[in-house]
Image (spheres, rainbow, N blue to C red):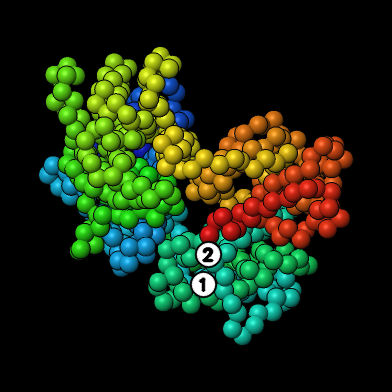
Amino acid sequence: MVKREDKTLENFQAIDIWHLLNHRFGLHFRKEGGRDNQLYNKLKENLCCPKELGIGKFLRLNPQITALRFIQALLGVTEPFSNMYKDIFTTMKEFSVKEAYEAILIRYELENEQIEFNLDHFKEFLKVESLVRQVIQQRVWSPQFVNEIPHFFKVLTNNSIVIERHPVLTDVLEQPPTYSDPKLNEYLFEVYNLLLEIKTHRLGEGLWLGAYNLAKPFYDEFTSKDFSLNIKEATAAYEEIFSRLDSEDVEVEVLIEKFIEYLNLPFWKNRWYVYEVWITLRTVKALENFNIKLNVQSDGVLPLSSGRYSHVGTFIDEKNQEYTLHAQLQTSVEGFEKRKGMEPDLRIIEGHNVESDFTKIIIECKQRIEMNKEQLEKNIELYEYGASNSHNIFVNYDLFPNIQKDKFKRTQLISNVRPNNIGEFYKVLNKLLLTYDIIPKRSKDNYNALLLDSSASMDGYLTYDVKDKLLAILDEIDVDNYFYFNSDLIESVYNTPKSLIDNVTPKGGTNLKCALETLMKKYTDVKSVIIITDQDPSLYSSEVREQFNKIHELNILEINK
């Protein structure tokens, strides 16, 4: 532990933390060809480090970079793995219900240790993550502060908010509207983020639950209606309430202690094994329409092993053909150089016959310590030789080395597969399921235009999970033209659902009726429209609807459930 009693979080140098974390906790960012190279480069980007400099040298040349800034930059690097960890438990929860178990425990066997994924470990992760972020914020939030939020909204609306004695609380937490006063906007978003934090992490704690139940009805009422605002007095009241919060400089030892605890959690310490578990459960999720049954043991454990075989689950297609999903199943590759067998990460097999001829799809995570073009091509050759009837998907958290296009007929490489970019994996997997007629072929619906709501109210709704769900829906639809809309129709340069969704910038008000009227005037041949919005479809009139042969609404709030 670094001992510098005169150093607080704000002025402690980043270089000291870099040395401590990098050398003591095995980040191994700089190993040649290492699988952490992309993470290292992302940390450089977050620190604004020039490409020609290493992080250590850059931090030595810039002693003004504080521990706070460094930790914030590193949190940006750990976030995808944090999201994978959360995603794993979301999927586990869904399949726990389906399998009638109180909780599924995933036990991932390594050579010298086990990684276990269960509800208790997940709660511990959320607790530690929350503590780290609290330390970084240097704010000591309390339920007592939340109890004061109704007073803030009463002052802000001149006592116009009236709450019933027993208000009904909904799960939806809308983002606040924005106003011309920047200070009011800051305070409203602070309240929103605090309520979101409580809703996500602290509803199980008595004092926080009571405070949340008191404050949320006032917040909901404010965000759902228009009020005449008393901004000056309200911001003064907020500042007076905020001034009573406990606040003090955090010593660097506290930061280091909490952050080391954070980095020692499985989501980061065993990040590449977490990645394999995440890909496994994303595959399971893609097969959920077939009511896949996980091979959960009688004690509630779903065993997965590094380098050892496990039967993950079983599903049946619409023709009543049974398929099985296997991890690390070894089959012979006799005749391929000096190799005796191969063990891909995942296989989808027709029936229970484990002979390689019955393998239909192979999914392989290629996030290795070292991987060059020659090694990659040799692995692809091995799998195409060893499973001659299979189509293969190689996924990588980073970029694959460039290989000759169309050199391999039955293998597809997908780079940058991570929580905010899983759509391409689903698309390729579904295409292969179609190839084997596991998913029956059907004609797509066609729409002349797709309108994506880009108003300010959409901000925060298009999470990576919602984007994936949207893209899965839109993959079944053919669209001719793509548009945004807020207070009116906005022309778009994008011509795919993914590019339209990825590049949306929420701002402005919402006027769907006006957008549709503009569409009718400028594009008279458009007769079928699909609309993605968070608004009620009644915002446009029956007269407008009658101008179209077909209108289909996708409500983002329903998709977000």
- Amino acid on which disc 2 is placed: Leu
Instruction: Identify which residue, 133 or 69, lies in the foreground.
Output: 133
Q: Position of residue 309 (x, y in %)?
A: 18, 43
Position of residue 68 relative to residue 363, above or below, is below
First reached walking from the N terminus: tag 1 or tag 2: 2
Q: Which residue is mark 2?
A: 195
- Amino acid on which disc 1 is placed: Tyr
Determine whether the residue tagged by mark 2 lies in a helix, strand or loop.
Answer: helix
Outermost residue on the front side: it is: 319
**Left or right placement of residue 375 versus residue 69 in this view:** left
Residue 134: quadrant of the picture:
bottom left
Q: Position of residue 103 (x, y in %)?
A: 30, 64
Q: Position of residue 421 (x, y in %)?
A: 47, 38
Of the numbered discs in the image, which one, if any, rests on residue 302?
Answer: none
Determine whether the residue tagged by mark 1 lies in a helix, strand or loop.
Answer: helix
Position of residue 32 relative to residue 344, above or below, is above
For marks 1 and 2, give the CA distance: 7 Å
Q: Which residue is mark 1?
A: 212
* Mark 2 nearby-residue class (10 Å; few <14, some 14–19, many ≥20): many
* Mark 1 nearby-residue class (10 Å; few <14, some 14–19, many ≥20): many
**Left or right placement of residue 223 versus residue 20 in this view:** right
Q: Answer yes or no: do the residues labelled 1 and 2 have beta carbons within 8 Å? A: yes
Q: Position of residue 291 (x, y in %)?
A: 39, 55
